[in-house]
Image (spheres, grey):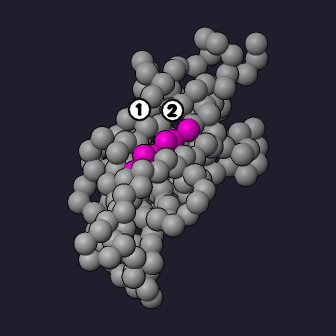
Amino acid sequence: MTENIQLNLRFDADQVTKALDYSFQTEGGDNIYREDGRCAGTFHFPTGGMLDIGLTMTAKSRDEVQFHIIDFTIVSVSTLPLGKSSLSIFSESNACSSVNHWGIAERKEKNDITTVNVQARERLPIVNSNGQWKISGYLSVMIEKKENKKKTKKMARLFYFDPEGTTGTGGDVSV
């Protein structure tokens, strides 16, 4: 049985950086990061599985913040020599995979922190059986903060992450 992978993305409404916090985990909660061996320093994806995507925003509870996803795209570019791999780990015919459908956001308040979670309704198939990719994710959001009872401040933000991933043995690296 092929295991699915959960990509967890996280940002804070007040952060000034563009870095999108991310983690990849199996359904059982195991990290898929390779610390050693031939594919050390990469996330190893099981061929035939699906990538599920969850997004979390945190903010101070007093700020009355919400966000709307404008778009989310994953770009995967092979790091192997030309002709040694498919265009993408998630698609045989396209290097870019867009996720446009998201579930209903769940809002929680705890210790003066608001946490808003939303899960993508779309899943990305892990289609390539053997290769290496630079995987970049780009998230555009509109953050809305109430400044007072009558005025809301809107701010468009872009966040991204940029790891490497492998499938199979990591591909044939000989030229």
Q: Main secondary structure of the magenta part?
A: strand
- Res. 139 in view: yes
Looking at numbered disc 1 in the image, what kind of residue is underneath it?
Answer: Ser
User: For the residue labelled by badge 1, is the local secondary structure a helix, a strand or a loop?
Assistant: strand
Question: Mark 1 vs mark 2: which is more N-terminal?
Answer: 2
Decide: is 60 above or below 28: below
| Label 1 crowd bin: few (<14), some (14–19), many (20+), radius 10 Å | some
Q: Which residue is mark 1?
A: 97
Q: Is residue 122 left or right of residue 1?
A: left
Decide: is 148 above or below 136: below
Looking at numbered disc 2 in the image, what kind of residue is underneath it?
Answer: Val
- Res. 166 in view: no
Name the quadrant of the C terminus. top right
Instruction: Quadrant for residue 143, please give it.
Output: bottom left
Span of residues in magenta: 136-141
Whether the residues at callouts 1 and 2 have beta carbons within 8 Å, the answer is yes
Q: Is residue 89 left or right of residue 83?
A: left
The image shows residue 48 at horizontal and vertical percentages of: 42, 36
Decide: is 93 above or below 118: above
Task: Name which residue lies at 36% across and 82% down.
Answer: 109
Q: Which residue is mark 2?
A: 75
Q: In the rendered picture of this protein, how many numbered marks are placed on residues?
A: 2
Name the quadrant of the N terminus. top left
Task: Name which residue lies at 52% across and 20% down.
Answer: 86
Q: Can you name the residue that lies furthest to the bottom here? A: 111
| Label 2 crowd bin: few (<14), some (14–19), many (20+), radius 10 Å | many
User: For the residue labelled by badge 2, is the local secondary structure a helix, a strand or a loop?
Assistant: strand
